[in-house]
Amino acid sequence: MARYTGAVCRQCRREGQKLFLKGDRCYTDKCALSRRAYAPGQHGQGRKKSSEYGTQLRAKQMTRRYYGVLESQFRKYYELAEKKEGKTGEALLAILESRLDSVVYKLGWASSHAEARQLVSHGHFTVNGKKVDIPSYLTKPGDVITIAEKSRSSAKFKALLEANATKPVPKYLEVNNDAFEGKVVSVAKREEIDLPVDETLIVELYSK
C-alpha cells in the first residue's frame, strides 16, 4: 500500500502542531517545530488568513497525518463511522484508535505511529494468538495483542519496554509488559484520545 515517504517533520510544521511522528526526538530541542515554528516552503512565514474550508481541511489533514493514513483510506473510515450510532466524528477517531498500529503505539511498544506500523508489518505481534502483519487491522474489545515469542528477546523490544515502563496507557487498553501482552478493553471514548483536533470540523468538511 502507498504511504507518505517525505520528511515527516514538515507535516508537523505544516499543521503548526506536534504530531509526535518521530517519537522521542519530538520531546527534544532537535524537534523541527521547536526550531522553526512556521510552515515549510518559500511562503511559510507569510501571513495567512484561514477560511472556514481551510480550518476544516487542516483538522482533517492533521488527523490523517497523526495516524499515518492516506486520503482514500481515511475516507473509508469516515464512511464506516457514518454508519455507527452516536457522533460521527467521535466514531471516526475511535476507529482510527482501533487500528493495530495505533494500539501497539498506545501500549508503549513503539516510539511513534510510523515505528508501530513497521513493527506490525514485520510480523512482531499476534492478535488472539494469530499472527497479524496488517497495520490497518481493526481490533475490537476483548482482543489480546501479544509480542511474538521470537521478538521478545530482541534488543529492540527490551529497550522499548524499558523506556516505556512507566508510560501511561489509555483507559480503553490494558498492558502487562511482564507477559508481553496487551488487551483492548473497550471502544476508545473521545476524552481518552489525546489528539488536539476538533473532529466536528472533519464532519463538516465531508458533509459538503
Image (tube, rainbow, N blue to C red):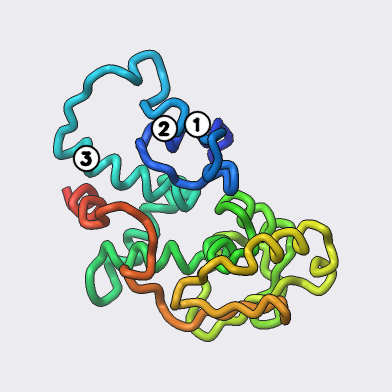
Q: Position of residue 103 (x, y in %)?
A: 54, 67
Residue 13 is tagged as 2
In this orientation, which residue lies closer to the viewer: 164 or 128? 164
**Residue hosting label 1:** 32
**Residue hosting label 3:** 55
Q: Position of residue 174 (x, y in %)?
A: 55, 80
Q: Position of residue 73 (x, y in %)?
A: 44, 53
Which residue occupies the extreme top position in the image? 42
CA gap between label 1 and label 3 equals: 23 Å
Within 10 Å of disc 1 (Cα), the crowding (few <14, some 14-19, many 20+) is: some
In this orientation, which residue lies closer to the viewer: 139 or 178? 178
User: Residue at 37% of width from left, 56% of height from top?
Assistant: 195
In this orientation, which residue lies closer to the viewer: 49 or 81? 49
Res 191 → quadrant:
bottom left
Within 10 Å of disc 3 (Cα), the crowding (few <14, some 14-19, many 20+) is: some
Q: Position of residue 118 (x, y in %)?
A: 67, 52
Q: Element type at marker 2? A: helix
Are the residues flagged by discs 2 and 1 in contact, CB closer than 8 Å? yes
- Residue 18 horizontal side relative to residue 112, left or right: left
Q: Is residue 3 visible?
A: no
Q: Element type at marker 1? A: helix
